[in-house]
Amino acid sequence: MRYMVPKGAGQGQRTQLLHGVLAMCLLSVIEEEASYGYEMVSKLRDRGIDLASEGSIYPLLSRLQKQGMIEGYLVQSSEGPARKYYRMSEDGRETLDRWRTEWREFASSVHEVLNGGRR
């Protein structure tokens, strides 16, 4: 059995899982307080999601902004150029609430499957 899964597949699987939930995690971080990209990556890393990088979140932030879930705005920085901050929109709050409910239901179902039908 152990030879059915290639070595190193765990990291790739984790990356795929993260890809599926990164938008939800970013919205949750932004809901707490308006943040800029590097700050979001740091918050995610502090919470155990260390596979996210600035390069992976900026396209997603752009997509979330185009979808109207977040709003971007510039803030002058004393440490260099202005930073683009993102804040939650009302549509983003509603979407995140819906995603949280769906996630809890999904996670509960996966937990039951992984535990042989026991909750």
Image (cartoon, grey):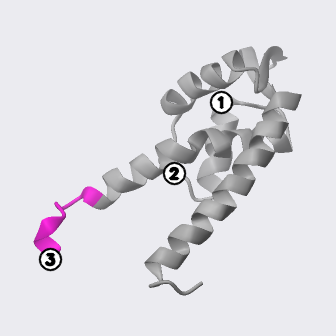
Residue at 82 percent of width and 29 percent of height: 91
Q: CA distance from mark 1 to mark 3?
A: 41 Å
Residue linked to disc 1: 37
Q: From the top left corner, tell me how far across and down residue 72 is, in percent.
A: 77, 18
Viewer-nearest residue: 65 or 84: 65
Estimate how packed mark 2 is, as few (under 14), some (14 to 19) or many (20 or more) residues with alpha carbons within 10 Å. Answer: some
**Mark number displayed over residue 50:** 2
Viewer-nearest residue: 40 or 97: 97
- Residue type highlighted by circle 3: Met
User: In the image, 15: left or right of 10?
Assistant: right
Regarding residue 63, the answer to whether it shows in the image is yes
Q: From the top left corner, tell me how far across and down residue 33 is, in percent.
A: 85, 39
Tell me, yes or no, whether the highlighted magenta stretch contains residue 2: yes
- Residue type highlighted by circle 2: Asp
- Residue type highlighted by circle 1: Gly
Residue at 79 percent of width and 33 percent of height: 92
**Mark number displayed over residue 1:** 3
